[in-house]
Image (cartoon, helix red, strand yellow):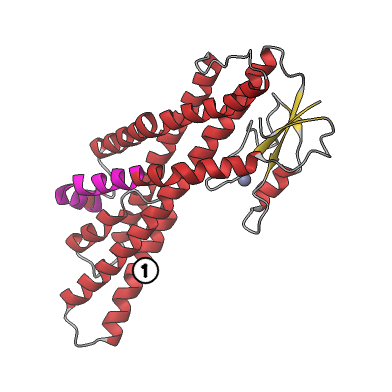
Amino acid sequence: MAVYFQGDVAKAAPSIGRQRLRDLIDRNDPRTARFLVRLWNKQKSDITYAELRQMILTGQIDAETIERWQQDYSRFVTSELMPLWREMIHDAAGSLAERWPVWSFDANTEQIAAYTARHAAELVTNSTAQQIEAIRAMVQRAATVQDLTVDQLARIIRPVIGLYKGQVTANFNYYNTVRQNLIQNHPRMKAEAIERRAQEAALKYATRQHLYRAHMIARTELAFGYNNGEFNALKQAQARGYIGQLKKRPSTADDERVCALCKALERETVDMDQPFSNGMQFAPWHPHCRCAMDYIEV
Ligand SMILES: [Zn+2]
């Protein structure tokens, strides 16, 4: 196993697992991100103007739409992520098996299934909730904008379906800015032309935002898959008596983009079965977290 050391914790070399994790993510990220973009495109085209108008008028999203979004994310997990996670569990186990050829890894243990299922359920719930929160905030804010009609609002809400709240707010602000600038600087431009230009600008921006979110989710979930596989493969090797006591320590990507939270956690070394101070067993700690794990035999 690439990230497996023997001996002194402090002297353990920076993880080679970090590079391995990065390679796995780079290889799989484009496909997983594309899956998400397709999913959101479908959600955008599935929603009717009648439904959008209803949302704006009531400030709420109907239960059927929420149900559909939830199903979409479930499908994302079962048909896209699960097979990748399984592959990564095997990948992690494979490097252990090289070390002990007699060892055969069992990926179907209850523990692996339970941990993965819990994470999958959380992912579906959180992604749907974030999306609902974002659209709700948008329709509620839209209701306070005086000079926009319901139809105009519907047209700017549709493209931001699938984004999270901060992104939706940024998109709406951008739309407003473009629109106000056109009104101020082109007094003779027709209202419809201004509206169309502002909508087009917001739409282009939304496309970039969807890509950003897609890669963020893809990369975080791929990191989860790898770290989950490694953790469980090591636990199994331990249970079979191949490895003794282990300590674990996160290893950041070690560049200027590493956040304070990850930097702080990197200073922690705990026993294999102990959670870190944030209550979690292994990275990724948050969206876009690129931390790998080091395991040290003591
Ligand atoms: Zn991190």
Residue 53 percent location from the top left of the image? 19, 52
Asked where in the image residue 124 lies, by quadrant, the reply is top left
Q: How many marks?
A: 1
Query: Neighbour class for label 1 at 10 Å: few (<14), some, many (≥20)?
Result: some
Residue 15 appears left or right of 162: right
Q: Residue at x 79, y 38 (%)?
A: 12
Q: Quadrant of residue 151?
A: bottom left
Q: Position of residue 128 (x, y in %)?
A: 37, 39
In the rendering, at what x and y percent does residue 288 appear?
53, 48
Q: Is residue 211 above or below residue 21?
A: below
Please indicate, yes or no, whether residue 285 appears anywhere in the rendered image. Answer: no
Q: Quadrant of ligand 1?
A: top right
Decide if residue 277 is on the left or right side of residue 155. right
Tell me the quarter of the image containing the C terminus. Answer: top right
Depth check, front residue: 26 or 61: 26
In the rendered structure, does residue 48 fall within the stretch colored magenta? yes
Q: Is residue 116 visible?
A: yes
Residue under circle 1?
174
